Amino acid sequence: MNIEFRSQDFSVSEALQRYTERRLGSALRKFSKDIGRVTVRLSDLNGPRGGADKRCQITASVLPSQAVSLQAVDADLYAAIDRAATRLERALVRCLGRTRESRRGRMSIRKPEDVRLQPLGSG
């Protein structure tokens, strides 16, 4: 899984980058074969004014051609990363579940000539 970091108005420390990689790694481990690139955008919405303004936006490309994107805002950047990773995991469960169900549905459709009727009472 390829994780790309982007930030506005501040630089991402190595510790913050390692934390994010570890958190996303544990959240996305079971989806590793279904996920391409993951982009993490970190920003401070209010700048030096403070408040609940640290945003973590994560976009994951789901193979072959979908994307799941969401964000979380908190006063603490680490908390925003945690919340975004948790939300991403839940969103991928829903997205990939629907994709797999639709594939399964297409594969299980049988042509009428493939269906064999058995008489009642023969069991």
Image: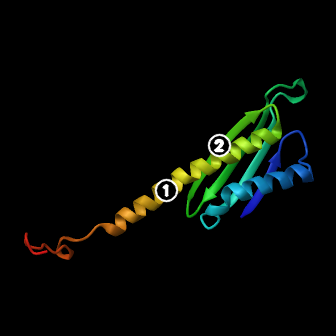
> Does residue 4 appear left or right of residue 90 in this picture?
right
Question: Mark 2, mark 1: which one is toward the viewer?
Answer: 1
Q: Could you classify mark 1 by the number of other residues whose Cα lies within 10 Å: few (under 14), some (14-19), or many (20 or more)?
A: few
For residue 62, what is the image quadrant? bottom right
* 66 with respect to 78 (left or right): left
User: In terms of depth relative to the viewer, which is nearer, 48 or 108?
Assistant: 108
- Element on which disc 2 rests: strand
Residue 16's x, y, as percent?
A: 87, 49
Rendering coords of residue 98 (x, y %): 46, 54
Distance CA(mark 2)–CA(mark 1) = 18 Å
The residue shown at (70%, 48%) is: 85
Which disc, if any, is residue 97? 1
Name the residue: 7% across, 71% down: 121
Residue 9 image position (x, y, % from top left):
88, 39
For residue 100, above or below residue 113: above
Q: Quadrant of the N terminus?
A: bottom right
Residue 108, image x and y in percent? 32, 68
Name the residue at 58% across, 48% down: 91
Q: In this picture, is 82 found above or below 38?
A: above
Say which mark, if any, is on residue 58: none
Q: Amino acid at mark 2?
A: Leu
Q: Secondary structure at mark 1?
A: helix
Instruction: Say which amino acid is labelled 1.
Output: Gly
Mark number for residue 70?
Answer: 2
Indicate which disc, 2 or 1, sits on the residue closer to the N terminus: 2
- Asked if labels 1 and 2 touch by Cβ distance under 8 angstroms, the answer is no
Count of all numbered marks drawn on residues in the image: 2
